[in-house]
Image (cartoon, rainbow, N blue to C red):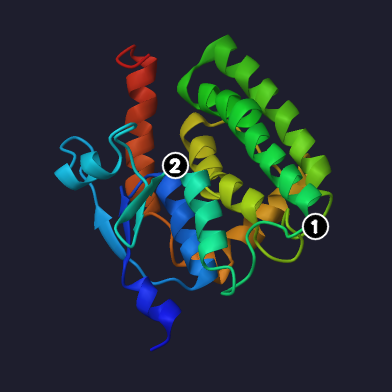
Amino acid sequence: MNHQQEGDKQVKLFGFWPSPYVLKVIWALRIKGVEYDYIEEDLSNKSDQLLEYNPVHKKVPVLVYQGKPIAESEVIIQFIDEAWKDRGDPILPEDPYERAMARFWIRFLQDKLSPPIWKWFTTQGQQQEDAHGAAIDQLLVLEKELDGKRFFAGEKIGFVDLSLGPLSYVIPIYEEITGVKMITEEKLPSLSAWMGNFLSSPVVKDHLPPLDKLRLRLQAIREAFLNGKVK
């Protein structure tokens, strides 16, 4: 067994099954062919290990490598890409400018796209309509950036694809629950094709949460927001 494979034995991932942030890390580990031990957390009764490894945020995911913890999904993904640089496909581009642009689009997803999509899902009436319009505006920006490419990174999944990836299966569930379409082939053809390409990727297709179970969970979350139980 070579040194890298031996090192895989020292990799642990603390997660929670519906977490899109955990899933992004799992996909990154699969791209690099890294074996790991997965520890499922009960976030209503967090383990002492999780609190020890992530005392600042007390959240998943946490990747533990050779006894050293790393928190926050985007940070973990970049660590995976660097720690196993010689394995699998690169997740971030080699070119410094392209790496910077990948990080720029990650910030775009976090700051500009995710908030209106979440507001669209957790509101109704005029608030929901306004959030839907705001989300479409940002999706059109991504549509232009994708510009018919298979993935944002080109022919293979990269950093931006991993970060956007959970929306490929969550958006259809949101649409089903709200009864409002968000991504259509007519209005967003490149993004629509990207969703299919991403979900059919070998890295992704066998590592998705149970969608029926997730749908029930998301339905309950939406109802809690609409009933004023969550702000």
Three-letter code for the amino acid on which mark 1 is drawn:
Lys
Q: Residue pushed farthest bottom?
A: 1
Q: Tell me: 230 left or right of 197.
A: left
Image mark for residue 72? 2
User: Between disc 2 and disc 1, whose residue precedes?
Assistant: 2
Element type where label 1 sits in the image: loop
Residue sitting at x 19%, y 47%: 49
Q: Amino acid at mark 2?
A: Glu
Q: Residues within 10 Å of mark 1 (few under 14, many from 20)?
A: some
Pick the front one: 214 or 76 = 76
The quadrant of the image that shows the C terminus is top left
Structural crowding at the residue carrying mark 2, measured as other residues with C-alpha within 10 Å and reported as few (<14), some (14–19) or many (≥20): some
Residue 175: image quadrant is top right
Q: Position of residue 134 (x, y in %)?
A: 68, 21
Instruction: Say which residue label 1 marks.
Output: 149
**Residue 146 place in picture, x, y as percent:** 78, 48
Is residue 123 depicted above or below 101 in this figure?
A: above
User: Viewed as shown, does residue 101 lie left or right of 221?
Assistant: right
Which residue is drawn at the image coordinates 48% and 73% (left, top)?
Answer: 33
Circle number at residue 95: none
- The Cα atoms of the two marked residues, 2 and 1, are separated by 28 Å
Mark toward the viewer: 2 or 1: 2
User: What kind of element bears circle 2?
Assistant: loop
